[in-house]
Image: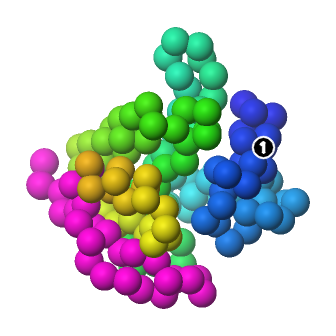
Amino acid sequence: MWTRSRRWLGIPATCGFWATARRRTAPRRAIAGMLGHWALRGYGFFALEEKASGAFIGWSGLLNPEGSPGIEIAWGIAPDRWRQGFATEAATAVVHYAADTLHLTRLISLIHPENVASIRVAEKIGERFVGTIEFQGKDVRLCAVDLPPR
């Protein structure tokens, strides 16, 4: 999994909107951050595997970095699996996990304004545009969804 994840996280197309996308250390830092989030927050990212092939195709989960306006749902899918519904399927499962297991009441997404595919996924999981904010030195779209109590 490490080799597949590292290779995938180093592809500019999969990380193009990340501030660290072009740094050589980006894959290692991203994976360390994903694992550390579980230890610090009790939630984090899940690896996504295609059922038919068992291939690693991306990740989805929750994060709350310092300075974030809320708990964020995020996703990333390998370019050869784009436009197949995997991001929406994974994000929907994470929404259910957040509501049913973690009993969260609100999730946000911080999306680069040009990332049309992620904006569509956010809309499909019920998020609505709240406004544009600056986060970590970039202007991003803040989208949010209120989760029903369970």
Residue lying at 12% horizontally and 55% vertically, measured from the top left: 148
Quadrant of the drawing holding the N terminus: top right
Under mark 1, the amino acid is Arg
Q: Nearer the viewer, residue 93 or 89?
A: 89
In this view, which residue lies farthest toward the top? 52
Judged by its main secondary structure, the magenta piece is: strand
Q: Which residue is mark 1?
A: 6
Q: Position of residue 141 (x, y in %)?
A: 39, 75
Q: Is residue 17 left or right of residue 62?
A: right
Task: Locate residue 78, reporting x and y percent.
Answer: 61, 39
- The x, y position of residue 145, in whole percent, is 23, 62
Write the start and end of the magenta stretch as one range: 125-150
Above or below for 4 versus 138: above
Q: Residues within 10 Å of mark 1 (few under 14, many from 20)?
A: some
Q: Is residue 17 above or below residue 125?
A: below
Residue furthest left in the image? 149
Residue 135 located within the stretch drawn in magenta:
yes
Q: Locate residue 87: give its quadrant.
A: top left
Specify whether 106 is left or right of 77.
Answer: left
Does 146 lie within the magenta span?
yes
Q: Which residue is rendered at x = 73% and y = 68% of the image? A: 20
Q: Residue furthest right?
A: 24
The colour style of the image is rainbow
Q: Is residue 1 visible?
A: yes
- Residue beneath the point at 18% across and 63% down: 146
Which element type, helix, strand or loop, lies under badge 1? helix
44 sits to left or right of 143: right
